Image: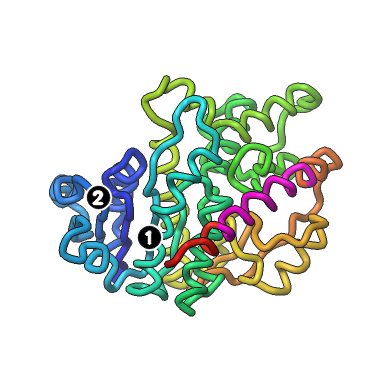
Amino acid sequence: MVKAVVLGAAGGIGQPLSLLLKCNPLITELSLYDIVNTPGVAADLSHIATPAKVAGFLPPDEGLTKALTGAQLVIIPAGVPRKPGMSRDDLFKINAGIVEGLATGIATTAPKAFVLVISNPVNSTVPIVAEVFKKHNVFDPKRIFGVTTLDVVRASTFVADIIGDLSKAPDVVVPVVGGHSGVTIVPLLSQSSHPLPSGFSGEKLDALVNRIQFGGDEVVKAKDGAGSATLSMAYAGAEFAIKVINAMKGQKGIIAPSFVHLTADPAGGEALKKEIGADLEYFSAPVELGPDGVIKINPLGKITDAEKKLVEAAVPDLTKNIQTGIAFTKKSNL
């Protein structure tokens, strides 16, 4: 039996994410929570002929507590989407309070659940969740994940496109490390399972790195004020959620990048800090998943000089983003 909960289930990411989770036979119970419309979304999804029993909850009558009771997996896409001209700092001011409130609900009702944070800016919202859990004495770094999978999905898709065969996209594996915004996104294209064409370097390579880093801006601009990367983010969130569920059920050898607290694997975390040359609390690296969450944080491995520079460039923003999240919870009375 697997109970999954989506917090922010009526939004642009939440609805397609809930659909994808409902379609997966591994999930037997699906609880949807938001400030509006979840009973309708749940009723709609409940007609789909898959095993998951669906229920929708709103804030009145302890709806959050009811949604979270018995949860093994909680996914948080709640918050407002980015609009044209909006920075992730602007986004943070709105989404931080939303995430903090939801994290408090999880900490008090389902503290052992795996928590997958999608709400942006992930580099700051994951530290908020962790700090809330610390306040309630239930913090387990092995169970809190920042979902950076969309960066990996984009890298795989773009590389397959450059190779000239999009049918290979599901099989292309490109580790993407660092964080989940702009220059903190570091694609390790030298480690791509499917090498880029001979001579693909210089400006072409720089352009590909930039497209992976700022793919979200590409979508925001194309939607022209009508939203951000909701559908691809829902797909990526569901992909990572299923990896966590498979690992929870005992499947071995599942490795995926995620933005985690580096004490999730103290030895691996310390080795990674030496590689990146900075004493960061959080970093997105390929992590091995198991029944209790993070088993191992893998090293970056052999990377090019250009990739080393990308890692170095990511550190200042990462440091600032992480501290912003921690500082927010210090000011709060929660």
- Asked whether 321 falls inside the magenta stretch, the response is yes
Position in image of residue 118 (x %, y %): 46, 50
Q: Which labelled disc corresponds to residue 136? A: none
Amino acid type, callout 1: Gly
Q: Quadrant of the N terminus?
A: bottom left
Name the secondary structure under disc 1. Answer: helix
**Does residue 81 appear to the left or right of 70 in the view shown?**
right
Q: Residue furthest right?
A: 305
- Asked whether 37 falls inside the magenta stretch, the response is no
Position in image of residue 303 (x %, y %): 80, 47
- Any part of residue 67 in sight: yes
**Does residue 53 appear to the left or right of 331 in the view shown?**
left
Q: Quadrant of the C terminus?
A: bottom left
Position in image of residue 257 (x %, y %): 60, 54
Depth check: give the residue in front, 315 or 304. Answer: 315
- Any part of residue 292 in sight: no
Amino acid type, callout 2: Ile
Q: Which labelled disc corresponds to residue 35? A: 2
Label 1: few (<14), some or many (≥20) within 10 Å?
few
Picture quadrant where residue 127 is located? bottom right
Depth check: give the residue in front, 224 or 162. Answer: 224
Identify the residue at horizontal 61%, vertical 45% (top origin).
173
For the record, the magenta segment spans 312-327
Tell me the distance, in whole angstroms, between the alpha carbons under discs 1 and 2: 12 Å
Position in image of residue 122 (x %, y %): 53, 50
The residue indicated by pointer 1 is 101
Residue 209 against residue 64 in the figure, above or below: above
Q: How is the image coloured?
A: rainbow
